[in-house]
C-alpha cells in the first residue's frame, strides 16, 4: 500500500486500548542513502503540552490516512531526541530542493511517497508535481487535470538544507552526471553556501572538473567558502595549466595561502607557465600530452598509451622526442596511424617530420591562425633555440580565446547579462 | 632558471613574484557596483514618475519632507534584502519556501504576484500613455507592445534590447535640468525637505501611500536579492555591495526630488492637475520647449518597457523557484513551460486591464502604487523574520540599532496602510450608515 506523507501528518494515533495518544508530527527515516530508506518510527505530538514522543515502527498495528493504531499500550513517554543519522521527513526533506537525476534538473519535494509492505515502512519516492501541492493545501484537483509526477527515491539526489544536517548524504547519484551539469545544478539551485558543502562531499577528480568549468568569479566565490585543505586536494587533480588559471582567478592573497599545500612538481610547472604573459601561446597551452622517444615501434607506443593511468583530455597526436632523455621535438604522429599502419613499424616511419609548431611568446591568435590554415587540431609549442617541447595548444583553447565568457559556466537567470 | 635545484619555498617565492605583476582585474570592485543601483533606479518607473509628478503638481513641495525618511527606509530595506542574498545565496521565494509552511509560501507568492502584477500593469499604462502623447491610440499601441515584449523575451535576445531600454529611460534625467530651468527658490525647497506637513484629506493619504509604495516597492527587494545571488556576491565582498545599495537609494531619491521640484514650480502654480502623460510632460517645457513632449514620451516608454520586462520576468522566476518548476531565461519554452506561461499571463492580463475603456491611465497608475503600498508591510514582515533567523543568517542577523530602525519602518508602513484601508472602508460604509 502506498501513502503520501501529507496524508499521514496530523493523523490521530491510538494505543491498543483505543486511547488517543496524540497526532503524527513527523516520520523518522534511517539509511537515507539507500535505494528505499527504512522508516524507523513516528514522532507523535501529545495533546496540550506539545511534548513529542517517538513510536517505533514495530509498535504500529494499523496505518491508514484515517487513524494509526498501535499494537501495545506501553508508550515510552520520554521526549524525542533527534539522534545523528536520523532524518525527519517533514522537517528535513519536505519543500527542499532535490535533483531529478534522469531529467538532470532541480526540483522541489512537494510530497513524499511512503510504502507499506509486510508491516515495514519505506520511503519510496518523491512527488514533484503541482498535484502534490494542491493535495497538501487541501485544494481539490478537479477531475485530476494536473497529473501526479512521481520520481523514485533511487533516481533523485537529495541535497540537504541550508543549515548543516545531522546526517551524512552520499552523492553517488549526483556524481553520475556530467561535471558541467553538476556545476549548473548546484549553482542555480542551492547557492554557494550549500553548494560548496555538496561539492566538498564529491570525489576530488569530479570536483576538479566542476571547478574547471566555472567562470573565474564563481570559482573565487566557491573556493572562498571551501576548506583550504580540500581546495589543495582538488587542485592536485587539475592539470598544471588549469591550476595556473585558477590561481590567477583566486588572486594574490589566496595563492599565498594555498601554494605551500601543493606538490612541488605541480608548483614547478605552474611557475613556468606563469612566466608567459597574457594572450601569448604559452599562457594558453596545456602541459598534458603524450610524448614518446624515437626508435620505438607503433606497438610499443600502443602499449605505453594503454598502461598510462591518466590520459590527457586531448589525445589525437603523440609527440616524438629525440630520445628518452632529451626534450627535443623531432616529429608528431597522429593517432590514426595506429589503425592504418603496420604496428611493427617504427614511429619514425609514419611520423610527420616537417613540423608546424609555435613558440611560447607568439600571440595566441597567430597560433590559432596557423592551426586553421594547416587544418590541425593541436599545435606543439617549442622553445625557439633548441626546439624543446613545452606544451601543446588545442582547438579547445581556440574556442576559449574567441568565446571566453560564454563557454564558462555563469549563473544567468534573469538579470546579469 | 634552474627549477630542479630550488627548494619549495624559493619556488613559492618565485610564483608569488610572478603573480604580483599580474593584474587581478583592477576593475574587480567596480564590477560589483550595479545591482543596488539598478534595483533602486528601476524604482523610477512609470508608476514612480506619475506619482512624483502628481504629488508635485497637486501639493507643490508638500511631499518633500518624505524624501529623507524614505531614503533611510529604502536603504534599510534594500540592505536587508541584499544581505539575505549574499549570506544564503538564495532568492527570496526559495527562502520563504524553505523556512515557512507551504500555506505561507502560497500566501506570500499570491501577495507578490498581485503586487508585481500591479507594477507591470502600471508600466503598461505608462507605455500606452507615452504613445497617446504622440496621438497613437492605446488600442493600437498596447497589443503591438505586448506582442513585441513577449517575442523578444521568449524568442529573441532580450539582453541586447535591454540596453536600449536603459538608454531611453535615462532621458528622464532631463527632469533634473527641467527643475533647474524652473528657477526654484532653493530656500523654500530646503525648508520643505526638513519640515514635515501632514493632512488628513483622503487625497493626501492616498497619495502618501502611493508615494511610499512606489519608492519602496516589493519587487525592488526581490530584484536586489536575486541579482546579488546571480552576480555571485558573497559576504567577503559585501561591503562594496552595501555602498552600492546606499548610492542607489540616494540617487533614486535625488531624481524624485527633482521631479517634484520641476512639477511644483511649473504645474502647481499654474493649477494644472495631471490627468494625462502630456500634462506631466509640460513640466519639461521651460527646459526643452517644444521637445518636452518627445523627451518625456521616449523616456517614459523606455522606463516602462524596462520595468515591465524585468518585473514580469522576476515574478515568474520567483514563483517557479518557490514551487520547484524549471525557470530562467536560459531555458526555452519547452523546457520551462510554467515559467513562460506565468510570464504570458502577466503580459496578457496587463494589456487587457490597460485596454479597458473606462479607466484613465494616470488614475490607474496611481491606484496601483497604492496597492503596492498596502502589500509592502506584509513583505517587510517576512524579510524581518528571515533576516533575524539565527540558523539561516548566523552572525549576520540585524544588530540592535539597525533592527530597531527596521521594525520602526515596518510599523510605520503598516500604520499608513491600515489608515488608508480604514479611510476607504469609511468612505464606502458612511453613506450606508446614514440610512
Image: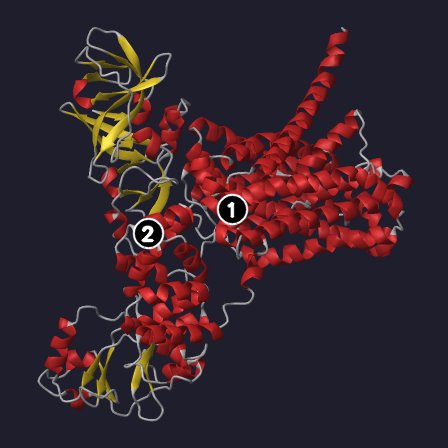
Q: Nearer the viewer, mark 2 or mark 1?
A: 2
**Crowding at mark 2 (Cα within 10 Å: few <14, some 14-19, many 20+):** many
Q: Is residue B409 above or below residue B85?
A: above
- Percent across and percent down for residue B180 are 85, 53
Question: Which residue is found at the position 71% from the left and 14% from the top?
Answer: B429
Q: Is residue B322 visible?
A: no
Which label sits on residue A109? none
Q: What is the quadrant of residue B288 in the picture?
A: bottom right
Residue B91 is left or right of residue B199, and the answer is left
Q: For the N terminus of chain B, which image quadrant? A: bottom left
> Which residue in the protein does label 2 denote?
A199
- Percent across and percent down for residue B127 are 68, 46
Q: What is the quadrant of residue A357 in the picture?
A: bottom left
Question: Which residue is found at the position 80% from the left and 29% from the top?
Answer: B198
Frontmost residue, A373 versus B236: B236
Label 1 chain ID:
B
Q: Which type of secondary structure does the marked residue at label 1 adopt?
A: helix
- Percent across and percent down for residue A397 are 38, 73
Q: For the C terminus of chain B, which image quadrant? A: top right
Residue B82 is left or right of residue A343, and the answer is right
Q: Is residue B294 above or below residue B396?
A: below
Frontmost residue, B353 versus A231: A231
Label 2 chain ID:
A
Q: CA distance from mark 2 to mark 1?
A: 22 Å
Count how many numbered circles sit on residues in the image: 2
**Crowding at mark 1 (Cα within 10 Å: few <14, some 14-19, many 20+):** many
- Percent across and percent down for residue A33 are 22, 40
Q: Is residue A144 visible?
A: yes
Q: Is residue B298 above or below residue A1?
A: below
Question: Which residue is found at the position 40% from the left and 51% from the top?
Answer: A187
> Which residue in the protein does label 1 denote?
B226
Q: Which type of secondary structure does the marked residue at label 2 adopt?
A: helix
Amino acid at each position: 500500500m502506498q501513502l503520501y506523507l501529507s496524508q499521514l501528518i496530523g493523523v490521530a494515533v491510538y494505543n491498543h486500548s483505543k486511547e488517543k495518544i496524540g497526532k503524527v508530527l513527523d516520520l523518522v527515516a534511517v539509511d537515507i542513502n539507500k535505494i528505499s530508506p527504512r522508516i524507523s518510527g513516528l514522532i507523535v505530538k501529545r495533546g496540550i503540552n506539545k511534548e513529542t514522543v517517538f513510536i517505533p515502527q514495530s509498535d504500529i498495528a494499523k496505518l491508514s490516512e484515517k487513524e494509526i493504531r498501535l499494537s501495545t499500550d506501553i508508550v515510552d513517554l520520554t521526549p524525542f531526541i533527534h539522534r545523528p543519522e536520523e532524518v525527519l521527513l517533514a522537517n528535513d526533506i519536505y519543500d527542499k530542493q532535490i535533483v531529478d537525476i534522469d531529467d538532470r534538473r532541480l526540483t522541489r519535494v512537494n510530497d513524499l511517497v511512503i510504502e507499506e509492505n509486510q508491516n515495514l515502512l519505506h520511503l519510496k519516492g518523491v512527488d514533484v508535481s503541482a498535484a502534490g501541492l494542491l493535495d497538501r493545501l487541501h485544494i481539490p484537483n478537479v477531475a485530476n487535470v494536473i497529473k501526479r509526477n512521481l520520481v523514485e527515491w533511487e533516481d533523485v539526489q537529495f541535497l540537504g538544507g541550508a543549515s548543516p544536517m545531522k546526517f551524512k548524504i552520499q552523492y553517488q547519484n549526483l556524481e553520475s552526471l556530467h561535471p558541467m551539469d553538476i556545476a549548473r545544478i548546484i549553482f542555480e539551485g542551492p547557492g554557494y553556501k550549500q553548494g560548496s558543502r555538496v561539492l566538498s562531499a564529491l570525489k576530488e577528480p569530479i570536483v576538479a572538473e566542476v571547478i574547471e568549468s566555472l567562470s573565474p568569479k564563481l570559482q573565487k566565490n566557491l573556493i572562498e567558502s571551501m576548506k583550504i585543505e580540500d581546495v589543495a586536494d582538488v587542485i592536485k587533480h587539475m592539470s598544471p595549466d588549469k591550476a595556473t588559471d585558477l590561481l590567477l582567478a583566486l588572486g594574490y592573497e589566496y595563492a599565498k595561502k594555498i601554494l605551500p599545500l601543493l606538490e612541488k612538481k605541480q608548483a614547478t610547472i605552474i611557475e613556468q607557465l606563469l612566466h608567459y604573459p597574457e594572450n601569448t601561446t604559452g599562457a594558453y597551452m596545456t602541459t598534458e600530452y603524450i610524448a614518446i622517444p624515437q626508435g620505438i615501434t607503433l606497438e610499443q607506443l600502443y602499449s605505453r598509451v594503454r598502461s598510462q593511468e591518466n590520459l590527457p583530455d586531448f589525445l589525437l597526436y603523440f609527440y616524438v622526442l629525440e630520445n628518452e632523455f632529451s626534450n627535443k621535438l623531432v616529429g608528431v604522429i597522429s593517432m590514426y596511424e595506429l589503425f592504418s599502419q603496420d604496428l611493427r613499424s617504427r614511429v619514425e616511419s609514419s611520423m610527420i617530420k616537417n613540423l608546424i609548431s609555435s613558440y611560447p611568446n607568439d600571440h595566441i591568435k597567430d597560433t590559432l591562425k596557423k592551426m586553421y590554415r594547416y587544418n590541425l587540431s593541436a599545435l606543439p609549442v617549442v622553445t625557439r633555440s633548441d626546439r624543446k617541447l613545452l606544451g601543446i595548444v588545442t582547438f579547445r583553447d581556440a574556442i576559449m580565446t574567441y568565446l571566453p565568457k560564454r563557454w564558462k559556466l555563469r549563473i544567468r537567470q534573469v538579470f546579469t547579462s | 632558471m634552474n627549477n630542479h635545484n630550488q627548494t619549495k619555498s624559493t619556488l613559492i617565492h618565485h610564483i608569488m613574484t610572478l603573480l604580483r605583476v599580474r593584474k587581478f582585474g583592477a576593475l574587480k570592485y567596480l564590477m560589483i557596483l550595479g545591482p543596488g543601483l539598478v534595483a533602486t533606479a528601476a524604482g523610477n518607473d512609470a508608476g514612480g514618475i506619475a506619482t512624483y509628478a502628481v504629488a508635485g503638481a497637486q501639493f507643490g513641495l508638500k511631499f518633500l519632507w518624505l524624501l529623507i525618511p524614505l531614503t533611510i527606509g529604502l536603504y534599510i530595506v534594500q540592505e536587508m534584502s541584499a544581505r539575505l542574498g549574499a549570506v544564503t545565496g538564495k532568492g527570496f521565494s526559495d527562502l520563504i519556501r524553505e523556512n515557512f509552511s507551504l500555506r505561507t509560501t502560497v500566501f506570500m507568492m499570491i501577495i507578490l504576484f498581485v503586487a508585481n502584477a500591479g507594477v507591470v500593469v502600471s508600466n503598461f499604462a505608462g507605455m500606452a500613455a507615452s504613445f497617446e502623447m504622440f496621438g497613437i491610440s492605446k488600442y493600437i499601441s498596447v497589443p503591438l507592445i505586448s506582442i513585441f515584449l513577449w517575442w523578444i523575451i521568449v524568442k529573441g535576445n532580450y539582453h541586447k534590447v535591454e540596453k536600449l531600454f536603459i538608454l531611453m529611460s535615462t532621458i528622464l534625467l532631463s527632469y533634473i535640468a527641467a527643475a533647474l530651468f524652473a528657477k526654484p527658490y532653493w530656500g523654500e525647497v530646503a525648508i520643505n525637505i526638513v519640515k514635515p506637513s501632514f493632512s488628513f484629506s483622503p487625497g493626501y493619504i492616498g497619495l502618501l501611500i502611493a508615494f511610499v509604495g512606489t519608492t519602496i516597492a516589493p519587487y525592488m527587494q526581490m530584484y536586489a536579492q536575486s541579482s546579488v545571488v546571480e552576480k555571485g556576491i558573497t559576504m567577503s565582498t559585501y561591503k562594496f555591495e552595501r555602498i552600492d545599495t546606499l548610492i542607489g537609494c540616494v540617487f533614486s531619491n535625488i531624481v524624485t526630488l527633482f521631479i517634484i521640484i520641476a512639477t511644483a514650480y511649473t504645474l502647481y502654480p499654474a493649477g494644472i492637475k495631471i490627468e494625462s502623460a502630456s500634462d506631466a510632460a509640460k513640466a519639461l517645457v521651460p527646459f526643452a520647449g517644444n521637445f518636452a513632449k518627445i523627451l518625456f514620451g521616449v523616456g517614459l516608454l523606455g522606463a516602462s518597457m524596462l520595468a515591465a520586462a524585468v518585473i514580469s520576468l522576476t515574478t515568474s522566476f520567483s514563483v517557479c523557484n518557490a514551487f520547484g518548476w524549471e525557470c530562467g531565461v536560459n531555458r526555452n519554452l519547452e523546457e520551462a513551460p510554467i515559467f513562460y506561461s506565468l510570464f504570458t499571463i502577466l503580459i496578457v492580463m496587463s494589456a487587457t486591464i490597460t485596454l479597458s475603456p473606462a479607466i484613465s491611465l494616470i488614475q490607474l497608475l496611481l491606484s496601483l502604487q497604492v496597492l503596492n503600498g498596502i502589500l509592502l508591510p506584509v513583505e517587510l514582515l517576512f524579510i524581518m523574520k528571515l533576516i533575524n533567523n539565527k540558523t539561516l543568517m548566523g552572525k549576520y542577523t540585524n544588530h540592535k540599532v539597525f533592527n530597531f530602525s527596521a521594525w520602526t519602518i515596518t510599523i510605520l508602513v503598516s500604520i499608513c496602510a491600515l489608515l488608508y484601508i480604514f479611510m476607504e472602508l469609511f468612505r464606502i460604509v458612511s453613506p450606508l450608515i446614514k440610512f
